[in-house]
């Protein structure tokens, strides 16, 4: 007989996609799944597309937001808590799994108040605001970095990594063709990377560097960049969105991107050399901590957002393009951060939590 699990986490794909990966494992094992999210987050689209049921609550942020936003969130919180608790009771949740984001706060607190085992996934080097507040009350914390262990009770935390699509682990180093640089600031793009990339194109052209550039701009700045790139005379393409990112990784020698947990784990899974440019306004500066964790082990290069411009972009790429040994060392180092069985381990922990809770209730 299967258990009923509630999954929560949303806002961005980095929160939603790992939860879906774990849900797929649980569904294959015969369990019932229900997601709780917000209508404004990416979960509203991604969860139904993956074939799972979702119910919505109202929620918002409290950390690093303005006073008006904090007041709006405060007024929504009682409603979010009440609705979350009602959903957990009605669905008969045996355990709750959270991957973070605004929606996770009310659902996680409701689970704790109802005595439901709560398993959280914290993929960043520094835990998010909500996870820090409930660190001592979770059933288990599944972490992305060794250094995050210090935030949680030793018996309730383990490093599992973030669930990543299997296709990323099937990546092999590109063997032929021009040196290809994949630039990605995520599905929405990154202004700093777009600006630095554009400024670098004349430098690559004038130097005669044999590079091929694939640049995901996001939709907002695509029109402004695509014609400029066509006129640059460089090999490659500018696109608003890359739907098959594992394939893009397989065709690349180097990734230049942000340092969100999802992107960092995909880079590790694929064994990619990378230059990471942390988003400076991420909550608790967690992107910088993620990038630093890799850079300390020689698994990536880090450039601060304020320091990234066309000249720096050009120099970082050229330094690695002309040093094949450095590229190989980086690929070997970053694979140590990869965790191919993260989704399966999360499912194991949830089943264990549900089984223990069921036995306690019966006795």
Image (cartoon, rainbow, N blue to C red):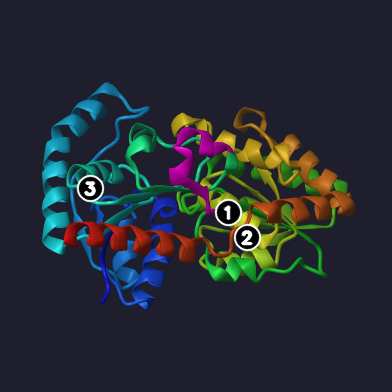
- Residue in the image at 33% along x and 57% along y: 353
Which one is nearer the viewer's eye here, 19 or 282? Answer: 19
Secondary structure beneath disc 1?
helix
Q: CA distance from mark 1 to mark 3?
A: 28 Å
Secondary structure beneath disc 2?
helix
Q: Which mark is residue 269?
A: 2
Q: CA distance from mark 2 to mark 3?
A: 32 Å
- Residue in the image at 30% along x and 46% along y: 104
Which one is nearer the viewer's eye here, 76 or 121? Answer: 121
Q: Residues within 10 Å of mark 3 (few under 14, many from 20)?
A: many
Q: Is residue 9 above or below residue 359?
A: above
Q: Residues within 10 Å of mark 2 (few under 14, many from 20)?
A: many
Q: CA distance from mark 1 to mark 2?
A: 6 Å
- Give the label, 2 or 3, closer to the camera: 3
The first of marks 1 and 3 along the sequence is 3
Judging by the rendered image, the residue that carries numbered circle 1 is 265
Place residue 27 in its image quadrant: bottom left
Horizontally, residue 271 falls left or right of residue 76, namely right
Outermost residue on the top side: it is 67
The first of marks 2 and 3 along the sequence is 3
Residue 223, position in %: x, y? 51, 53
Residue 71, position in %: x, y? 19, 26
- The residue range painted magenta reads 147-161
Horizontally, residue 209 falls left or right of residue 157, namely right
Place residue 311 in its image quadrant: top right
Are the two marked residues, 1 and 2, in contact with CB atoms closer than 8 angstroms? yes
Horizontally, residue 128 falls left or right of residue 330, namely left
Q: Is residue 156 magenta?
A: yes
Outermost residue on the front side: it is 363
Q: Which mark is residue 111?
A: 3
């Amino acid at each position: 007989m299967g258990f009923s699990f509630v999954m929560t986490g949303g806002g961005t794909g980095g929160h939603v996609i790992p939860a879906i990966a774990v849900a797929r494992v649980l569904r294959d094992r015969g369990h019932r799944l229900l997601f709780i999210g917000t209508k404004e987050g990416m979960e509203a689209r991604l969860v139904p597309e993956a074939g799972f049921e979702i119910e919505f609550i109202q929620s918002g942020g409290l950390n690093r937001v303005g006073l008006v936003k904090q007041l709006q969130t405060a007024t929504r919180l009682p409603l979010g808590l009440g609705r979350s608790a009602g959903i957990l009771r009605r669905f008969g949740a045996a355990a709750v799994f959270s991957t973070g984001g605004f929606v996770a706060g009310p659902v996680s607190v409701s689970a704790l108040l109802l005595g439901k085992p709560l398993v959280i996934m914290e993929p960043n080097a520094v835990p998010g605001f909500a996870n820090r507040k409930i660190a001592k009350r979770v059933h288990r914390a599944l972490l992305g970095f060794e250094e995050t262990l210090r935030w949680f009770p030793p018996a309730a935390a383990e490093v599992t990594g973030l669930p990543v699509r299997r296709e990323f682990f099937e990546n092999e180093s590109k063997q032929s063709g021009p040196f290809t640089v994949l630039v990605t600031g995520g599905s929405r793009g990154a202004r700093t990377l777009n600006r630095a990339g554009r400024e670098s194109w004349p430098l690559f052209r004038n130097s005669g560097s044999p590079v091929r550039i694939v640049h995901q701009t996001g939709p907002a700045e695509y029109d402004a960049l695509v014609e400029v790139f066509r006129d640059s005379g460089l090999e490659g393409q500018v696109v608003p969105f890359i739907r098959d990112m594992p394939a893009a990784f397989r065709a690349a020698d180097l990734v230049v991107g942000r340092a969100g947990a999802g992107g960092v784990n995909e880079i590790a899974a694929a064994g990619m050399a990378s230059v990471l440019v942390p988003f400076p306004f991420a909550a608790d500066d967690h992107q910088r901590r993620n990038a630093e964790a890799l850079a300390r082990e020689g698994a990536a290069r880090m450039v601060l957002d304020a320091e990234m411009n066309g000249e720096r972009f050009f120099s970082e790429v050229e330094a690695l393009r002309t040093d094949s040994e450095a590229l190989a060392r980086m690929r070997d180092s970053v694979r140590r951060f990869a965790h191919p069985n993260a989704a399966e381990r999360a499912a194991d922990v949830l089943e264990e939590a549900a089984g223990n809770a069921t036995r306690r209730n019966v006795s």
